[in-house]
Amino acid sequence: MDQSLGFMTSAPSVRVQRNGNSRVLPIPADLARRAHADLRDIYDVELVGEDIIYRRHGAHQVSTQGTGGGRIGMIPTSAVTPAPQRSSVPPLDWDF
Amino acid sequence: MTALAEWPPSADTFYLHAVTAHRPLFQGDVFRDVPFTKARSAGNPDRDPNVVIERRMVALLGYPCDIYNDGRLVKVQTVAPVVDATKMGIPPDWDGAFTLAPLPDLLGDGNTYAVDLRTAANIDASYLTTDRRVRALSEDGWALFRQRTILCDTRAMIELAPLRDFGSPLWAEIELWQEWNEAGQDPAAFQPWLDTHDPHFGGFTRRSALERRLSGQVRNLMRLAL
């Protein structure tokens, strides 16, 4: 049921592109405002049951596996940077 | 939220403004007057250590899925001590303080404290009572706390956006659970309710719907059930 689409906002309308074809769909202006959607923002669209889920497209999306206590996230490497320098905290002793 | 204008963040960013007993215990909650156990060497590896027990402030370390089992607190919990950050030699920008998680203005007196993530102890869950809870983290504070624990253990800095994104279904769950409790329901009955298959979600569980970011629909269903 999932369908990945891309669209650019030009609130109160959005241009949806799929397989090279595009069309314009209306979107409530209030919804666009509350989502801080700006012109040329790109979102991914997913159909879940009868609901359409819009997620802001970005390089740092987390894919997940499992559910409940077994749910884990896969952090993209682009969201990870090494710590910049050596520790500045004194070594641990029993007086902590 | 991918960047912060100030570091460490303000208390307004870091904590929930009002925490009642209905709020389920959660990762990063700070408690006072909790027995923290140290096992110091007796000077000989063949002898048992000298055990020192100190009553102090601690932060709950476990991931929420490990704190609870079937909606009840797991008997054995893991906590880390809260220390006075001004005594840790931390630079103003916190550079290099990888092993500490800040707790800005923890007690409302303007002083910054920190969770020392290098040390942890197991305690009985019965010591973690809501009347001893000093603070509970906000959604942003929880993302920051997880960022610090990962930084401590891996020396890798993960941006806040994916941490918050991944955590949002669990955050929605805890908010629903709090609302469930506020309605006078049995707290232990929430998780079974959440794990119920529901025709409104095509036969999937309400939890599965929550994890698909349908928290609004799950909340509406729950309010009808309350």
Image (spheres, coloured by chain):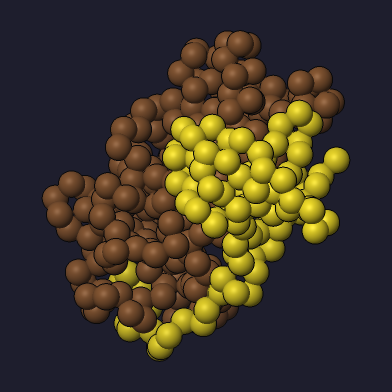
Where residue A84 sits in the image (x, y, percent)? 43, 85
Quarter of the figure that contains the C terminus of chain B: top right
**Residue positioned most to the left:** B109
Q: Is residue A57 above or below residue A25?
A: below
How far from the left and from the top, in percent, is residue A52? 70, 36
Residue B162 seen in this snapshot: yes
Residue in the foreground of this view, choosing between B214 and A16: A16
Establish if B116 lies above or below B15. Answer: below
B5 displayed left or right of B101: left
Q: Considering only vertical position in the picture, is B223 above or below B46?
A: above
Palette colour of chain B: brown
Tell me if A2 is positioned left or right of A62 in this view: right
Q: Nearer the viewer, residue B200 or B44?
A: B200
- Measuring from the top left, give residue B210's x and y in whole percent: 66, 35
Residue at 34% x, 63% y: name it.
B4
Residue B123 at x, y percent in the picture:
49, 49
Q: Is residue B28 visible?
A: no
Q: Nearer the viewer, residue B154 or A21?
A: A21
Residue B207 picture quarter:
top right
Q: Colour of chain A?
A: yellow
Identity of the residue drawn at 17% across and 58% down: B111
The image quadrant that residue B185 belongs to is top right
Check the picture and name the quadrant holding the N terminus of chain B.
bottom left
Left or right relative to B34: residue B8: left
Q: Is residue B199 above or below residue B125?
A: above
Q: Residue at x 22, y 75 (%)?
A: B92
